[in-house]
Amino acid sequence: MLIDVHAHLDLPQFDSDRNSVIERAAGEGILIINSGLGPDGIERTIRLMENNDGIFATLGLIPQEFNSDIIDESIGLIRKYKDRIVGIGEVGLDYYWVKEAEKRRLEMDNFRKFISFAKELNLPLVVHSRDAEPDMINELESHGISALLHCFSGTPELGEKAISFGCLVSIPASIMYSRRKQKLAERIPLEHMVLESDSPYLAPTPGERNTPLNIRLSAGKIAEIKGVSRDEVADITTRNAKEFFNLRF
Ligand SMILES: [Zn+2]
């Protein structure tokens, strides 16, 4: 069994064949945690979860959302569905798309809001960060909260800092070609690692649509890097995800 801790199967890229993508993943023993973002993504993800065994939900909002109505509506919906989800996220900091200091401050305010919200609801937190890893990790550490770092793209040193206070580092299928991700996987112990597809993004071949099936490739690649069996990678990453999200299956 494998767990894809982060996918966006609710997006339009799967409108023509969503059911077959889900069935094929289930047929290969892959459980999926779908990340629903913003009011529409939240509703779509809840429907996806309710219609499919083997799909769990985390709910969040893209960091670069500054419309306070949308932020409030998203938080209201997450509260409404809190008993049916396994985590809050993704939420976080994106300095790639947000360059202005004032807007970065707003992003940080929202990130803090979601950190408090996850603590209040006692749900695990899934974090997105892009070009903002030092600030993101400091923020988590100062709030005394560990998180799953989705598609972590910081340095191996920052990754080690994050795992020192309990974070999990999620490795995407782009590890098949990304030297950076391969180096990260070398340094992060399996006990702090999980697998994600981030479907439809981050395919093992750039430009293609990604699906949860591709985390099988990542498991093989990580096994090769670590010098262990693929089964060991599958077992440990599955156990990590199961414990972090308190999954029942
Ligand atoms: Zn995502």
Image (spheres, rainbow, N blue to C red):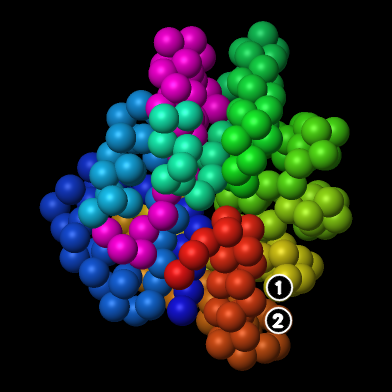
Count how many numbered circles sit on residues in the image.
Answer: 2
Q: Amino acid at mark 1?
A: Leu
Query: Pointer 1: what residue?
Result: 190
**For the magenta stretch, what is the residue range?**
52-78
- How crowded pointer 2 is (Cα within 10 Å; few <14, some 14-19, many 20+) is rated as some
Residue 146 seen by the camera: yes
Say which element carries label 2: helix
Q: Residue at x 49, y 65 (%)?
A: 248
Report x, y in % for residue 31: 41, 67
In this rendered view, identify the residue nearer to me: 16 or 95: 16
Report x, y in % for residue 121: 60, 35
Q: Residue at x 57, y 65 (%)?
A: 242
Q: Earlier in the sequence, mark 1 or mark 2?
A: 1
Q: Amino acid at mark 2?
A: Lys
Say which element carries label 1: helix
Q: Residue at x 48, y 54 (%)?
A: 6
**Which residue is at the far left?**
16
Marks 2 and 1: in contact by CB < 8 Å? yes
Report x, y in % for residue 194: 60, 64
Report x, y in % for residue 180: 67, 59
Query: Pointer 2: what residue?
Result: 226
Q: CA distance from mark 1 to mark 2?
A: 8 Å
